[in-house]
Image: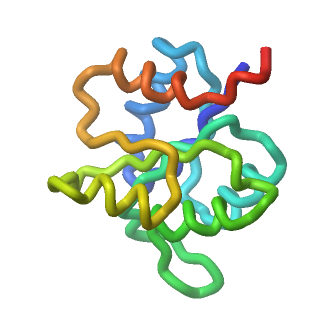
Amino acid sequence: MRTVLIVEDDLINARVFSKILTKRGGLGVKHTEDVEEVIKIAQAGEADLILMDVSLSRSMYHGKSVDGIKITQMLKSDPQTADLPVILVTAHAMEGDRENFLKQSGADGYISKPVVDHQLFVDQIVALLPKNEP
């Protein structure tokens, strides 16, 4: 089973995403907002895709506050995790933000909150899952 790692500091959102992905997408999910854990899961190959909230309010790494963009940059700059697809999730989608966020972070895709169309949400994620595994 494919696994999506949800990096989200809002538990209600995380729960909603989990439910949609497991029920509609038939996917496994993990959830954490702990940056060390995100990196550990990514490096261990325990997730096939990361759903990354852009504005993580409580996430710290080495004593510094980091957001989803920064974490994505860290993952993308590490050869071990560079190929892991990352989809940014943000509620602050202004025109042009999307391109900036994607360019800045190196993420593979972008979803705006709130997620209204559950099927589209699943489809966007499934489309970016690595194809080479059964």
- Name above or below for residue 4 compared with residue 77: above
Q: Nearer the viewer, residue 89 or 28?
A: 89
Name which residue lies at 49% across and 23% down.
Answer: 21
Q: Residue furthest left?
A: 95
Name which residue lies at 38% across and 47% down.
Answer: 89
What number of labels is visible?
0
Q: Tell me if 49 is positioned left or right of 46 in this view.
A: left
Name which residue lies at 79% across and 14% down.
Answer: 134
Q: Position of residue 66 (x, y in %)?
A: 49, 74
- Name above or below for residue 31 compared with residue 19: below
| Residue 113, picture quadrant | top left
- Name above or below for residue 70 compared with residue 118: below
Image color mode: rainbow
Q: Tell me if 46 is positioned left or right of 52 in this view.
A: right
Q: Tell me if 116 is positioned left or right of 119 in this view.
A: left
Q: Position of residue 104 (x, y in %)?
A: 44, 66
Could you tell me which quadrant the N terminus lies in?
top right
Q: Position of residue 35 (x, y in %)?
A: 62, 65
| Residue 124, picture quadrant | top left
| Residue 82, picture quadrant | bottom right
- Name above or below for residue 100 compared with residue 120: below
Name which residue lies at 33% across and 62% down.
Answer: 100
